[in-house]
Image (tube, rainbow, N blue to C red):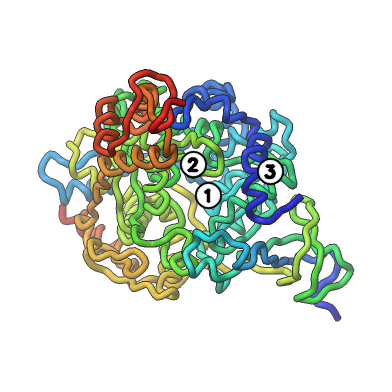
Amino acid sequence: MSDAKRGDLAQIHKIVLEPDQRPDNLPSCTKSVPYECWIKGFLIDENANVGDEVKITTFIGRELSGILYQVSPIYDHNFGEPQKELVSIGNEVRKQLEKS
Amino acid sequence: MDNSYSPVMSRKKEILKRATGIDYDKFEISPITFDYEGLMNSCEYSLEDVQRILQETGVGNTPLVELKNLTELVRSISLPGRGGRIFIKDEAANPSGSFKDRRAALSIFHAKKLGYKGVVAASSGNYGAAVASQAAKRGLKAIILQEVYDSRKVGQPEILEKTRACEAYGAEVWQLTVGPELFYIMLRVLEETEFFSASLYVPTSVGGIDTLGYELAEQVFQKEGRFPDMAIITHAGGGNVTGTARGLKKAGSHNTIVVGVSVDLQGLHMASDIDFNRKSFTTGHTGFGIPFLTWPDRTDVPRNCARGLRYLDRYLSVTQGEVFYTTELLAKLEGIERGPAGNTSLAAAISLARELDRDQILVVQETEYTAAGKLPSSQLTFAKENGIEVRRGDPKENIPGKVIVIPERVDQIEVEDIDMEKIRHSYIERAMKMTESYVPTQEDIQFLAEDSKTSFDYVRETLESLNIKTANSTSRLVRGREA
């Protein structure tokens, strides 16, 4: 069975510029790595596996091609962990207001 | 067509002319001078037109809220009689959750009027979401280009949230790695799609913000019978300062002190793959704020309509820790939970209010929405994961990219004045460098004076100190010989 079929939400990956195609005025840590990009859309190919060259229709209907990177990618940014440096601030300033 | 880096960059002028609908050459007067007001008025929208257009998509007319508890807290640490009243313009009430809707609203309306089928914007921040949202409302397609990841594919939580928001509004989003080649991609996409460039720096983008300055002046006047003493504005590319200051003037609020504020990220390189994830703030910081004052035309259009130096009376920095602390104060004391980046100017207001008398009024002119990724807990979690030390202490011990110090007490919040004199000097020096052999005329000196909010004599003396000869007349000379 393949990873994705036609119509699935898919994310493609493209190398936009290889390091030697990037401008010379970049910091060396940036110049030494490729310039990459990821774009989401719906798979056009009948079937595909991660790593295959595929075509997608983007959310605005444009056709783009790239390497299939992920199928049904999720948003995994979150609210973070409780921060001990922050949690007591509210009570500290409330106390100060009560004093004044 | 050759789509490699240099050929695309060399087609920049034609691409942008088609993509903005503006022939920038028409406004060029000399290598230094251009007709700024002419360019600003080139799209022919009056303030009333802009207000009406914004209203059509539910943008603007946001509440102005007095932060009474925060003001009380400031007074408790101020000298007797001191502690100005702090008001905030709750811009998070705009459709996509920030003042950036004002910038997007007019540009998208204009793009549609000119017959473009879609718009392109390069923004990892609230502006991208604003463009996507306004485009959805007006039935245009939107492509948003974002600098999201470092070479490990690790992305700032705040920017990941922006990707989600833009996609929620139906935009095609390009998530890119670190690099100034964002502009190259933008040119390629503009050329390929023939869409409108919803650059942050076109006249319509800055013109939309005029309504913010105008509204806040009017709201304060209606409540208090007078105009605000100070408007405090988070500064990055210059649009927020420019539009707000222009709007204040249009409302007749001529004596309001215009204060710009950026988060201090000095020492971090904005194009560095390594530094990229060592910061918690992705905009509103000195990494954009200072270079955009000293060289406003460093943008994605030939002439930048956002010219902060023209309007700023004072420019300040605050630390990341002070802004996170302030974000907590706003939530806990005022019941208003908003995104940290939008609270940059509020952190400064806490410090500035201590300088003012009790009857004086400071307006913080924005807030922004908060969400997963865009709040202190997620941003500090990310900072710690990326090797940043986070602790309570004196914010003076803050080191951008190394240590975030959350203040222990509110009186430790203290703005740092950025030397405007030095900035004005480097602005003039940069203008000379950019035009190398050209000899500035009297007209150029006048332009530089207006553009740096100085005087004719100030510019002349600065040029003398730089050993730059000037022409006595308005005729054009090339340095060393007559043109």
Mark 3 neighbour class, 10 Å CA radius: few under 14, some 14 to 19, many 20 or more:
some
SS type, badge 1: helix
Q: Does the rendering let one see residue B245?
A: no
Q: Residue furthest front?
A: B481
Q: How many numbered tags mark residues here?
A: 3
Locate residue B109: give its quadrant: top right
Label 1 sits on residue: B126
Q: Chain of mark 3?
A: B
| Residue B329: % across, % down | 32, 55
| Residue B377: % across, % down | 42, 66
Residue B314, placed above or below residue B474:
below
Q: CA distance from mark 1 to mark 3?
A: 15 Å
Q: CA distance from mark 2 to mark 1?
A: 8 Å
Q: Are marks 2 and 1 in contact (CB under 8 Å)?
A: yes
Residue B314, placed above or below residue B453:
below
Do dots 2 and 1 share one subunit?
Answer: yes
Q: CA distance from mark 2 to mark 3?
A: 17 Å
Residue B133, placed above or below residue B371:
above
| Residue A23: % across, % down | 56, 59
**Left or right of B70 in this view: B222:** right
Which tag, 2 or 1, sits closer to the chain's start? 2
Label 3 sits on residue: B136
SS type, badge 3: helix
Q: Are marks 1 and 3 in contact (CB under 8 Å)?
A: no
Given the image, on which type of amino acid does mark 1 rest? Asn
| Disc number placed over residue B259 in the picture, else none | none
Which tag, 1 or 3, sits closer to the chain's start? 1
Given the image, on which type of amino acid does mark 3 rest? Ala
- Residue closest to the eye, A52 or B133: A52
